[in-house]
Each structure stands twice: as structure tokens, then as C-alpha cells.
Amino acid sequence: MSDQSTPYQPPKVWKWEGPDGSKFASTNRPMAGATHEKALPVGHHPLQLYSLGTPNGIKITILLEELLASGHLEADYDAWLIRISDGDQFGSGFVAINPNSKIPALVDHSVRPPLRVFESGSILLYLADKFQAFIPQDLHGRTECLNWLFWQVGSAPYIGGGFGHFYAYAPEKLEYPINRFTLETKRQLDVLERRLQEAPYIAGENYTIADIAIFPWYGGLVEGWLYGASDFLSVQAYPHVKAWADRLLARPAVQRGRRVNRITGPAEEQLPERHDASDFTARAQD
């Protein structure tokens, strides 16, 4: 770590010096690939999800629960816990289905050979197309939905890897990166505020995968559970975003989806693994 009393000068050739002391430093490294042999479990449902209850992870479990709630019984799934703090994402089985070693990752066993799908935006689009649900079927509606889906994919790294990292996880608080990424986070919230003044949902009149993709990140900010930064960000300045997030949070499928693969927070809100709909009831009775 550099001495902040003198300006940092990048070396001519960067070299990794090992973990930097941040919260997830033990799992960060400048190379890809498996670190150990570990096969992935496979349950009895066609869809096998390997994930963790992070914003990117719960996008998928929310969509799967919404699909089931709307009558798509073929969307039943097993959700296996991947503990990223323990390095599960670097096991050989996980790397085989996602070479990028990031959650979530999905395997669809209803097709032959089984099909791997990784990156949360890709999984949302795959499932929406597979079941022809939560995505408009007309050209204009589908394109608007995808506009916002890819907006989220491109924008959220500024929230997580930028604002969230420097505000909540970095080993020391640094003014420049916190200011830089706070500015960008508030700009993005303003983009959503202006959009939601025009329509009740992100892509227009109907609830779609665009809402499901955006909610865990930006809904999490305005609802106060993401980085504990709602006061810092003055989220009361985004009333339409808050009202939209409240509508989504009231949906039973969203509530269930937020519990799956969750291992933090109140015990009654956690469901580390999900293999059957009855798991929600059984967990609540524990």
C-alpha cells in the first residue's frame, strides 16, 4: 500500500504483491482457471443454479420464482450455494461452466448435451426466451427491454466494483475514488428516476427482466440494504425509484428470490440452498 503523504506513481511494469487487505482480497488474483478439483452437485430438476445471494445472484432466483409463480412448472430448479469467500468459484466443476469464475452460473439439463449459461444478463435473457415470459415479444418492446438490460450490465460495475468497493470494502477510505463513484452512482439513479417518471416499469407498462436485473442493485440502494449507503446517497431524491422498488419488493416471488442462496442477514430471510418449493416453508419453521 502506498504512502498517501506522497503522490502515487505507477511502476513501469505492474506486479501483483498479494492480497491488498480489502474484504474479498483473499479470492482476488490476476489469473483465471481452477485452483482445486471439485465436482459440482446435480439435483433432480432440469435447471441447476450455482450461485450466492448477491445482487447478481438474486436476479436469477427472482426470475425463476416469477416463472414458477406464473405457471411455468418446467422452471423448477435446484439452487446450490457457492461460497465465494471460500473460493468455491475456483473449483474445477464451477470453472467448467463459467471460465470467468463468477456467480451465478446455470446448467440446463433439459437439452442435450446440457447447456451452460453464465453471466447474469445472459441467464436472464436465456430463461426469458426459453419460457417466452417477462420479455416483450414485439420488436419495439423487446428492444426497449434489452436496452435497459444491457444498461444494467454495463452500469452496475460502477456501483459494485466502484462505489461499493471504495465506500464499504476498501482497506482505507480515499476521497477521490469515493467522490468519483458516488457522482456516477447518483447520475445512474437519476437516469432511472427520469425513466420511471415516464412509465411504471423500466421497459414500459409491463414488468420484465429489465426490472429484475436492475432491482437488486438500484432497488437495494434506495431500500437501504446495499452498502448501508442510503443516507450517504440521499436516496430520498429519487422517489420514483423508491416507489418502483417498493412495488417489486411487495411481489411474493421477489421476496422468495431474495432469500435463495442467502447466508447473511436475519435467519428467517436466509435459504442457503433451494431444491423444492417446500424449502421456503421448512426453513421458516426451523
Image (cartoon, helix red, strand yellow):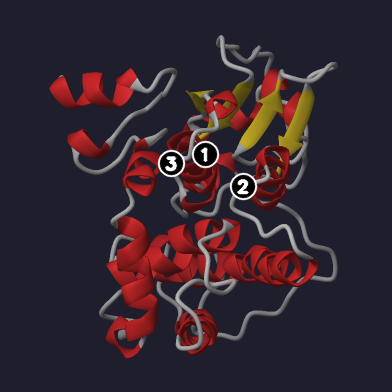
Q: Nearer the viewer, residue 23 or 48?
A: 48
Q: Residue at x 58, y 56 (%)?
A: 209
Place residue 276 in its image quadrant: top left
Q: Is residue 107 above or below residue 250?
A: above
Q: Nearer the viewer, residue 221 or 252?
A: 252
Kind of residue sitting beneath label 1: Leu
Q: Is residue 19 left or right of residue 121?
A: left
Q: Residues within 10 Å of mark 2 (few under 14, many from 20)?
A: some
Q: Is residue 242 above or below residue 98?
A: below
Q: Which residue is mark 2?
A: 133
- As helix, strand or loop, the secondary structure at mark 3 comes to loop
Q: Nearer the viewer, mark 3 or mark 2?
A: 2
Q: Residues within 10 Å of mark 1 (few under 14, many from 20)?
A: many
Q: Residue at x 33, y 75 (%)?
A: 242
Q: Is residue 229 left or right of residue 158?
A: left
Q: Are marks 2 and 1 in contact (CB under 8 Å)?
A: yes
**Rounded to the nearest whole Å, what is the CA distance between mark 2 and mark 1?**
7 Å
Q: Is residue 104 above or below residue 24?
A: above
Task: Residue 17 in the image: state x and y as whole percent.
Answer: 66, 51
Q: Which residue is mark 3?
A: 53
Kind of residue sitting beneath label 3: Gly
The quadrant of the picture occupied by the N terminus is bottom right
Q: Along the polypeptide, which appears first: circle 3 or circle 2?
A: 3
Kind of residue sitting beneath label 2: Ala
Q: Is residue 118 visible?
A: yes
Task: Residue 44 in the image: state x and y as whole percent.
Answer: 56, 9
Q: Nearer the viewer, residue 112 or 59?
A: 112
| Residue 67 - label | 1
